[in-house]
Amino acid sequence: MKSITIQHRFIIFVVLLIYSKLTMSAQMNLSELFESSLPSIVKIETFNAQNTPLATGTGFLISPEGEGISNLHLFKGAHKSQITTSNGKTYLIKDILYKNHSIDLVKFLVINKSNVEFSYMKLAKTLPKIGDDVFTIGNPIGLDFTITNGIISAIREKDGYGQVFQTNTPISAGNSGSPLIDMNGIVLGVITYTYTEGQNLNFAISLVNRELSIGFKKLDITKLPKEVIIASPDWIEDAYGIVRGFHAGMCENWRFNLEYKRNMKNFPDFEWDVYTIRTGKNISLESHVQGYYEGDIVGTTMMFATHKNMTYVISYGLDDTMHSNKGHSLLIISRITNGNVEYIFNGMIERKKLDNPNNRYFEEAGNSKVSILVEDKWYVRKIYIEDNYNEISANGVTFYINPYEFK
């Protein structure tokens, strides 16, 4: 019996020793993962037009060129936004490659004048298992680059968000946009929200096999005429949300809107909303125009088909409180070809009052490539587009808009 007891004690000792080494190894792995992940984590700061700080949060880089991901809500009202890496280097955000209101995500690109090759993180291709260890690195309440860890508590489907990971990993204000990382250093999701009516009920939007590209494309600003003024080149979310929303909705539902108008052709006094002039004749185009306003922001979104396989969606928005002498307006232009949407202009343009002998109030906004004629500040009457996509609009075409109402 005595020898059996000794054997048992020996076995217990070996098991405890192995467990101790495994525990130390796990602790070392977390430390190593922190060190390897840290260079890819960034602090995000946003500012208004007066350079007053608005918000602070977290993001992470996903390419050596400086593409990154964070939460969209961090950028609400931002005029300028920047990232700071763990080594203290600061880079301005240059372009927005993707944004999605419903899942609160934004994908950005920083200005990289020195052609720095950034450290970056890979996105997961397979789902984690419930109970898997995870961790995050963020900037909670000003404590920059803090690591916390936990487990995957559940995998859920959340209305408006899609797939989300519930985790008990502790988070605080400033962790918004932080990556939820597995023990292989792969990003599973983005920390987005928490339930305050419990403890450690935190949620990350899943990035597993999620597409983060919508073909968002802007004109090369350096090649535009000098009269084009981009007031806020790194905008993400601003007062013109209603205009951007109408534009995105029109692009997404362009077929439905055209079909809706076609079904009204048999109504008395029906006419398409947009026409052009060819060889001295008015040529009506299949089209739809919507005017709208929210607070001080007034917008018009227009869609018209120039031929069977090409449709333009154009949105014009202005702040009604701004005087024309110093006013700028938002202009967004998308081209839809064979069902594919491509943004070809997205920026702020200067508008100016035109002299008119008939005492009618006209303003013009745009440049030599794109211009809009507006009557009484709100009503778009004419659009000129010079688009090198094909021969139809390469030489410049003027489109006229019939009277419409605001709703």
Image (cartoon, rainbow, N blue to C red):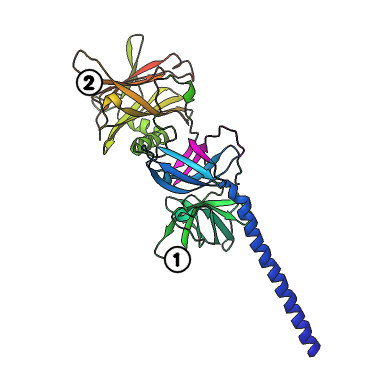
Q: Which residue does the numbered mark 1 point to in the structure image?
A: 199
332 and 34: which is toward the camera: 34
Where the N terminus falls, by quadrant? bottom right
Where the C terminus falls, by quadrant? top left
* Residue shown at the point (33%, 28%) measured from the top left: 328
Specify the quadrant of the image occupied by residue 147. Answer: bottom right
Please tell me the numbered disc located at residue 361.
Answer: 2
Mark 1: secondary structure: loop
Does the magenta portion include 107? Answer: yes
Q: What is the x, y in percent for residue 94?
A: 49, 34
Answer whether residue 123 is visible to the viewer in this image.
Answer: no
- Characterize the magenta stretch by its predominant secondary structure: strand
Q: Are marks 1 and 2 in contact (CB under 8 Å)?
A: no
Q: CA distance from mark 1 to mark 2?
A: 60 Å
* Residue shown at the point (32%, 11%) measured from the top left: 281
334 and 119: which is toward the camera: 119
* Residue shown at the point (72%, 74%) measured from the top left: 15
217 relative to 82, above or below: above
Q: Is residue 193 left or right of residue 68?
A: left
Q: Is residue 143 left or right of residue 318?
A: right
Q: What is the x, y in percent for residue 132?
A: 59, 61
Q: Farthest residue in the bottom direction?
A: 1
Specify the quadrant of the image occupied by residue 249. Answer: top left
Going from N to C along the chain, the mark reached first, 1 or 2, is: 1
339 relative to 197, above or below: above
Q: What is the x, y in percent for residue 208?
A: 56, 49
Answer whether residue 364 is visible to the viewer in this image.
Answer: yes
Read off the magenta span: 90-117
Q: What is the x, y in percent for residue 119?
A: 61, 43
Q: Farthest residue in the top direction?
A: 279
